[in-house]
Image: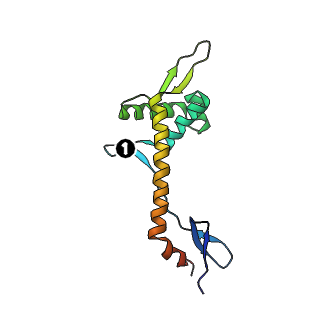
């Protein structure tokens, strides 16, 4: 006998197997901006910029992501080269000790990317429900 379909809220669907575990089938995607097919801005650099904004330091933001400073610096420089504008303003040491801050363009891009990503994921969920939900709700993969 097939396991009963399970729906939690309006988004989560799956099938419950005989020991009560629920299999969740949902859409997944990774999003990025590309230049001539080459990825230049995605979730990773977006998170890095958020870290710079929170800490005031590219070095600390990279460390919080378990990334070397040189890798973070390379990622930012590469993105800036493709995008044609700076993402981070660097302040050299001195009395305040230096640091980094997002440029207006960097902050705008981070916020715009997050908004776009959120809308794409929401649209993907809606399309998934429209196209796949009925069939996957009644399908028991362990059947």
Residue drawn where x is 36% and y is 31% of the image: 84
Taking 38 as reference, is 88 left or right?
Answer: right
* Percent of width and height locating residue 42: 46, 44
Q: Is residue 105 above or below residue 126?
A: above
Q: Is residue 72 above or below residue 122?
A: above
Taking 26 as reference, is 131 left or right?
Answer: left
* Percent of width and height locating residue 120: 45, 53
**Residue 87 makes an appearance in the image:** no
Q: What is the crowding at mark 1: few (fewer than 14 residues within 10 Å), some, or many (at least 20)? A: some
Q: Nearer the viewer, residue 121 or 37?
A: 121
**Residue 78 makes an appearance in the image:** yes
User: Quarter of the image containing the N terminus?
Assistant: bottom right
Residue drawn where x is 45% and y is 64% of the image: 127
* Percent of width and height locating residue 136: 51, 74
* Percent of width and height locating residue 83: 37, 34
Residue to which mark 1 is pinned: 34
Residue drawn where x is 47% and y is 49% of the image: 117
Check disc 1 and report its element: helix, strand or loop.
Answer: strand
User: Quarter of the image containing the C terminus?
Assistant: bottom right
Q: How many marks?
A: 1
């Amino acid at each position: 006998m097939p396991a009963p379909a399970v729906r939690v809220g309006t988004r989560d669907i799956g099938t419950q197997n005989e020991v009560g575990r629920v299999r969740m089938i949902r859409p997944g995607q990774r999003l990025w901006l590309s230049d001539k097919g080459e990825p230049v801005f995605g979730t990773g650099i977006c998170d890095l910029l958020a870290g710079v904004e929170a800490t005031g330091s590219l070095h600390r933001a990279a460390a919080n992501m378990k990334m070397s400073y040189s890798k973070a610096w390379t990622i930012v420089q590469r993105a800036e080269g493709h995008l044609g504008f700076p993402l981070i303003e660097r302040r050299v040491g001195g009395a305040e000790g230096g640091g980094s801050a997002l440029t207006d363009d960097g902050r705008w891009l981070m916020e715009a990317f997050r908004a776009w990503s959120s809308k794409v994921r929401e649209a993907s969920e809606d399309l998934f429900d429209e196209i796949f939900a009925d069939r996957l709700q009644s399908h028991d993969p362990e059947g």
